[in-house]
Image (tube, coloured by chain):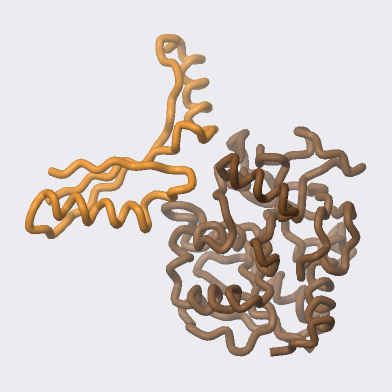
Chain colours: A orange, B brown
Amino acid sequence: MKARVFVTLKPSVFDPQGHTIADALHSLGYNNVGDVRQGKFFELDVNAASADQARQLAGEVADKVLANPVIESYRVEIE
Amino acid sequence: MIKFAVVVFPGSNCDHDTFHAATAVLGHHGECVWHKETSLKGADVVILPGGFAHGDYLRTGAIARFSPIMPAVIDFARKGGPVLGICNGFQVLLEVGLLPGAMLRNSDVRFHCEQVFMRIEQTDTPFTAAASRGQIVQMPTAHGEGNYYAEPQVIRDLESSGRVVFRYCDANGGVTPAANPNGAINNIAGICNETRNVVGLMPHPERACEPALGSADGLVVFQSVVRALAQEGAVR
């Protein structure tokens, strides 16, 4: 089973990298692109009995390691 | 003679300079402790040095916090032992939760490697005990992620309880945006924990401890802990 974890900076946190990318896009003429936020994507190969179990495991791993709760939040997708 | 333990993670690169400051410059005992060890071997002071522990993979300091040596460091800190985190070491202390908040990428997305001025705001920590309040010190920064962030309530707590220990300033002590190399909230360069024995700062005192390095202003950080421990009368 694959667990996909998407980690992003919390909305209240300034994202200088995303901002830089947005500026770059604007200078390339993509004026229809507004704000850009950069995040992280993790794909975990999970040995679990069910999707629920996989989701729980991924959440635990995300809480403990993959995301810094001070500045990041995450969501999990199971395949 | 007090004993400094300098923890070495794979990718730490300021351990030698920190060891040099404590031993050759200050004249005390030093020991480099590899991150896989589980004992601090009777150290009186623990320093987490600068560098790129674990290549900064995942997040700076994020993997180092799980190193085998960290339970001993946490225990030492909980018992009131003086712990100093320099740059990457500060990042590790944040990830491990010994200090509140987190580091973001520098706001201009540039690695800053330059001399900065800081104002010493508090002298009641083991690492600023030999300084005077408002003392201006100059030392080098070398970091890509020194943009200190914490939630508004945490920042308010830090400020109201006098736990901002170092603040970026200009040569005259003015706390201005221009003097802030990385966008850190309130120009925060270094903080301490509630029991004031754990201190983290982004600039490098070990790189400013001899005149030949361009500044010896960083020596006060090391001299302070020697004085603080002597006053405590506690040599472990």
**Which residue is at 67% across, 44% downward?**
B112
Indicate the position of residue A61 as horizontal and vertical percent values.
Answer: 30, 56
Quick check: A25 above or below A16?
Answer: above
Nearest the viewer among B92 and B154 is B154
Instruction: Kindly tell me whether residue B144 is visible in this rendering.
Output: no
From this viewpoint, which residue is outermost toward the left?
A49
Q: How many marks?
A: 0
Q: Position of residue B96 (x, y in %)?
A: 50, 63
* Residue A75 falls left or right of residue B12: left
Residue at (66% x, 40% y) in the render: B185
The image quarter containing residue B231 is: bottom right
Is B186 left, or right, of B232 in this rendering? left
Q: Quadrant of the C terminus of chain A?
A: top left
What residue is at 86 percent from the left and 54 percent from the top? B137
Task: Tell me if I can see residue B92 in this picture.
Answer: yes
Q: Quadrant of residue B204?
A: bottom right
Q: Nearer the viewer, residue B182 or A61?
A: A61
Across and down, in percent, residue B114 comes to: 75, 47
Spot occupied by residue B75 in the image (x, y as percentages of width and height)? 54, 77
Describe residue A32's horizontal placement relative to residue A41 as left or right.
Answer: right
Image height of B166 relative to B172, above or below: below
Nearest the viewer among B86 and B166 is B166
Q: Residue at point 65% right, 62% down?
A: B194
